[in-house]
Image (cartoon, rainbow, N blue to C red):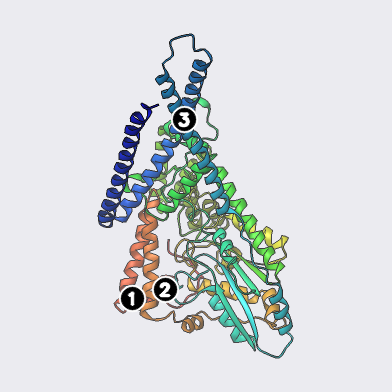
Amino acid sequence: MNDAAPRTSPRITRTIVRVAALTIVVLVARVVIGRFSPSIPLDSRLRTVGLALDTALVCYPIVFVAALVATIALGDRLVRENRNPGLEPTDPRRRVRLARGLAFSLSIVVGLILLEIAAGVVEFRLNRFPELPRFDDERKTVASSHHSNAAREIGLVVLGESSAAGEPYSAWLSLGKIVAWRIEQTAPGVKVRLHDLATGGANLRDMHQKLAHLKRKPDIVIIYSGHNEYQSRYEWSRAAYPIEGLSPIELISSRRALAGLAYRIGLRSPLCRLIYGIKSKTLLDRPPPPASRRGLIDVPPCAPSESDKILVDFRRRLEAITAYCKSIGATPILISPSGNDAGFEPNRSAPHVYHPDEQMSNLIERDYQTARRSEKSKPRDSLDYYMMIRGIQPECAEALFRSARVLRTLGRGDESRRCFIRARDLDGFPLRAISTFQQVYRIISKACDASLIDSQQLFEAMTDDGILDDRLFIDAQHPVLAAHVALAEAVLAAPALRRVIGLETTPPERLDVREVAEHFGVVGRDAWFRVAMRAGLFYEKTAEIRFDPSERRTKAARFLAAARAVAAGTPAESLGIPGLGFPSHVHGSADQ
C-alpha cells in the first residue's frame, strides 16, 4: 500500500511534463506561424493546407485499419492469457502493457467512429433544406391593400449567381434592377421593393439557404441559377480517376486506377467527404500549379455518383423553391441559364469509361494536332481527323468542339450548333449550365405551372444562325449588355408578372439597350474600362485549367488591350468587341 504512492508520483510528474512540453510547442508554433505566414504567398499557404488535408486522407484509413487490427489482436491475446493463466508463467506487467495497448487502440477506433458520426451530422446540417418563412398574416394584409386606391408595393426577390447579379455590369445594373425600374416606369402607382439575393459564385443550395432569411413576403420571385453547380463545389485542379469498366487486374496495375478506387471508397465515409469538401473550398477558383498541365484526354473532377447527386439536389431544390413561392402566394419566374457554346472551349475532355493507354493517347494527340493545323487550309480533311478521334473517343469534348467550328466554316449551321451544345454538355469541368440542368427547369415549370424563360431559345432567336457565342456572352456565361436587356424584357413580358402588376391587358414594351445603359450609368470611359478588364482577367484566370491555354490567353490579351485603349480615350464602340460600347446588336458572325 505504501509503495503505490512512490510509483504513481513519477508517472503523474512525467504526464504533467509531457502536457506542458506539448503546450509550449503548440504555442511556439502558433507564434511562429502568425509571425511569418503573412510573408508567405497566399497560393503557397493554400497549397500547404491542401497538402495537409491530402495527408489526412491518406493517414486516416491507415490509422483506422491499424488501430482496428491492433484492438482485435491485443484483445484476443489478453483474453487468452486471462482464460489460460497456467499455460505459461504470467507476468503482471505484460498484462498491464497489453491492457494499455488495447485501451489505446480501442480509443482510436472509437474516436474515429465518433468523428464519422460527427461528420455525418455536419454534412446533414449543411445539405438539409432550410425552414422557410410563411408570411400568412402579411399575405392577408397585402391582398386587401391591392383593392384600395393607395400606391401598391410589389416585393421582387431575385435568386441566382453572377449572371443574375448583372456581371460584368453588376457595378451598375442587374436583372432585378432593370425589371424593378421598368415596372415602376410603366405601371402607375406601383412601387417595387427589390431584394436582390443574387451572389457571384453561388449555387442553388446557397440561394435556398438565403431564402430562409426573408423578412417580408415577396410577390414575384425570379430564379436564375445553374452555372455554378460544379465550380462552386470543386477546385480547378481536382481529379477523380474513372474506374468504370476496369477489370480487377486493371484496377491494381494502374496507379491512377488505384487512386480512383481509393477515392470511391472515401466517398462512402462522411469524414472523408467532409475533408474533400474542405479542401475544395480552400482551393476554390485557385489556378492549378504550373506542373499540373491538363492532357487532351483528361479526367473529371468528381465521380459519376457525385454528378448524379448534384443534379438530383438541384432538381429537388428548384422544385421546393417554386412550390414554396406558390404556397405563400408569390409568382415564380424561372430562367434556365445558357452559356457561350461556340466561343468558350471545353475545360476538359473527360471520358467516364474508356482509359486509353499511352500509345493510344499519343495517337489521339497526333491526330488532333494534325486536324488543328488543317482547319483553315483544308477544313474537310480537318473534319475527317476530328471524326477519327470521335470514333476512338466518343466523349472527347474537344474534338466535338473543334468539329463544330469546322462545320460552321463549311456552312453546316444546324449540325454545328448541335455539336457545340454536345461539346458543352460533355465538358468534364463545366463552367456553364449543361442541358440536363436546363431540362430540369422545363420539367419543374410544367409540373408547378410556373413561368419559364428559356434563355437558350431566347438567345438563339437573337442570332441569324442560332449559335450562342461571343456576340451574346462576354466570357463563358455572362451575357453582354444587349442579352441582359433581352432577359429583362422577357421577364417583363411574362403574363404572370403582368397580372401581378396589373398590366395583363397592356402589351409589353420593348427595352432600348442604350436607354437602359444611360439610365444605370453604363456609359463612358470608366464603365467600359472595367468591363473589359473584368473579361480579360476572366480569360486569363481560366486559361491554365485547359490543356491548351493559347486561345484564352489571346482573348485575355485582346480584352486587356481594349481596356488600355479605352483608358487612353479610344471609343469602346470602335474596338469591335461585343459587349463593349454601342451598338450592342448581336446579329452577324462572331470573330473566332
Residue at the extreme top: 87
Residue at 60% in and 52% down: 311
Quadrant in the picture for the C terminus: bottom left
Badge 2 or badge 1: first in the primary sequence: 1
Q: Nearer the viewer, mark 3 or mark 1?
A: 3
Q: Which residue is mark 1?
A: 566
Tag 2 and tag 1, C-beta contact below 8 Å: yes
Hey, what amino acid is under mark 3? Ala
Q: In the displayed image of the protein, which residue is found farthest to the bottom?
A: 149
Q: Residues within 10 Å of mark 1 (few under 14, many from 20)?
A: many
From this view, report whether residue 431 is shown above or below residue 76. Answer: below
Return the residue at label 2.
Answer: 580
Q: Position of residue 442 (x, y in %)?
A: 66, 60
Q: Is residue 157 left or right of 237 when viewed as pictured?
A: right
Q: Is residue 485 above or below residue 105?
A: below
Give the total of numbered labels.
Answer: 3
| SS class, disc 3 | helix
Q: Residue at x 42, y 36 (%)?
A: 58
The answer to which of 545 and 321 lies nearer the viewer is 321
- Label 3 sits on residue: 103
Placement of the N terminus among the 4 image quadrants? top left
**Is disc 3 in contact with disc 1, using a CB cutoff of under 8 Å?**
no
Q: Quadrant of residue 568?
A: bottom left
| Residue 113, placed above or below residue 222 | above
